[in-house]
Image (tube, rainbow, N blue to C red):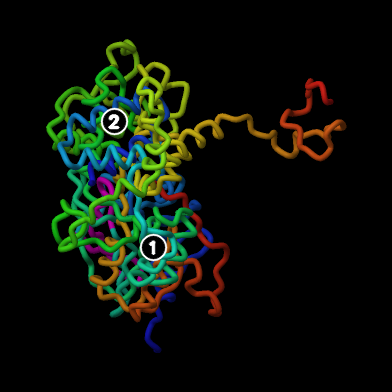
Amino acid sequence: MNRFAELLDRLAYEPGRNNKLRLITGYFREVGDPDRGYALAALTGALSFKHAKPALIRDLIAARTDEVLFGLSYDYVGDLSETVALMWPRRVLGHDESFPSHPSPPPSPARGEGAHRRRGVHPDPSRQRLNRAKTPASDCSRASRWYRRERAPRPAPASRRHRCRARPSRDCLRARRCRTRHC
Amino acid sequence: MTTMRPQDILLPVAAGLCCKPGGFHIDPVRPVERAVITHGHSDHARAGHGAVLATQETLDMMRLRYGENFAGSTQVIRYGEEIRLGDVTVKFHPAGHVLGSAQIAVTCKDTCIVASGDYKDAPDPTCTPFELVPCDVFITEATFGLPVFRHGDASDEVKKLLASVALFPERAHLVGAYSLGKAQRVIALLRQAGYDAPIYLHGAMEAITHYYQSRGIELGELRPAKGVKKAALAGTITLAPPSATSDLWTRRFPDPVTAFASGWMRVRARARQRGIELPLVISDHADWDGLTATIAATGAGEIWVTHGQEDALVHWCRSKGLKAQPLDLVGYGDEEESETPIQDEAEA
């Protein structure tokens, strides 16, 4: 599972599509069954975790860490699941299996997002485009959204911004010499 | 005479941590008459002091960075050596942070205060390992003073870098790393992992890296990245200061993979802010577990916290029954007032 986590990390940071594909193929080549099967299911949205919801995660971490320290950490990191993952007390045992003495419950393909897609599969195999592996609203798409947002034009600093007569409610993104039509 | 309070020995003032009975400052941020310096990072070691007491390596690094006349006079002190200054004795102990870094133990009568500067308890092939110094008051940094900062094994991070080089042999790998300490540690870790190809260097880190080599630290074959053809840099690893990895300078590399070796890389948002593709959690500072374990092991009853996330560490200390406060509040409410707190940019 650690190798899969590594893959997700790399995918989240990698902006290029071809490089993402390289990372995914590299992973499937390297890792054997059944791990890569689970990975495929996770990537295609066929896995669902019925009980792992934010409230439960909050309760679990509250039972394991100091409330003030968790508050300060959450405030710094800004993401609940990331904060919890980083703060989670270390285990002393080996780290190959998911939980010591608790084998992972079999993932259920009947509940996940992929299952809904499967119901929508077109009878004509040539048009079964829905079967394509697509990452759900996961880190990959979040990373690409972030990437686009980072490259969007930024508003000029307030001191250099001018009053736009046509659209007084909005701040014009350009600096003083604005040549857009609405000015 | 009444017993001496710790704040009568060391007190934060505008110029830095001042030792009145000894007549010196530790890591002063403004020019002072006598400075005692923990290590060569620019937020601790500054030019323009009258007299400087530090380890040989720290003095050499200051000379490299600021030129021959960086101080009026200098005095070398070795690890384990004790020197009397005014009414106090000063002893240097290895801090494990970078080459030549030291913790400074200041003893006056029977009170011992250890100013640890920056430190780490993790193994580092490029410097003397951290030494635990029992004391009454321990001044600790808190750069990574939140329980989310747990660094893990640096050699695993280097394996991640090597796996990426193997997966993308046609791309160049650019590793952002601070030029004093971090860069040399990454190179040494790469060599330990069996990587023996030449490693390329940004011009800004050549001098300090060659200084490390001159002190007997094996770093293998190093080449300047300047003047190398773009195609020849495919599949290579280049180390550069963090600012250079998002610079026009990177255009000389074929489709570079941007990595950054820093403890901040533990948090995703920090890596994304910088547009890093391959974050490597390698730090020259102790992580949360290192800080708390060290504090407990010193046996100090009072902890002064500085340099970073003071709140969380102060809270932890108090929850363990230790007296703790942020360093910039030490001495507040006394008859001796201190001015503005010291705020330093920590090299992480």
Query: Which numbered marker is on residue A57?
Result: 1
Q: Residues within 10 Å of mark 1 (few under 14, many from 20)?
A: some
Q: Chain of mark 2?
A: A
Query: Could you say where residue B177 lies in the image, as x and y percent from the top left?
Result: 34, 37
Q: Chain of mark 1?
A: A
Q: Which residues are magenta?
A: B80-102
Residue at 37% x, 46% y is A112
- Report the residue marked by disc 2: A24
Residue at 34% x, 39% y is B279
Query: How many labels, in total?
Result: 2
Disc 1 on helix, strand or loop? helix
**Left or right placement of residue B120 versus residue A127 in this view:** left
Quarter occupied by residue B129: bottom left
Query: Which numbered marker is on residue B347?
Result: none
Of residues A20 and B120, which is closer to you in this image?
A: A20
For the question of whether residue B177 can be seen, the reply is no
Residue at 31% x, 30% y is B239
Query: Could you say where residue A154 lies in the image, as x and y percent from the top left?
Result: 64, 33
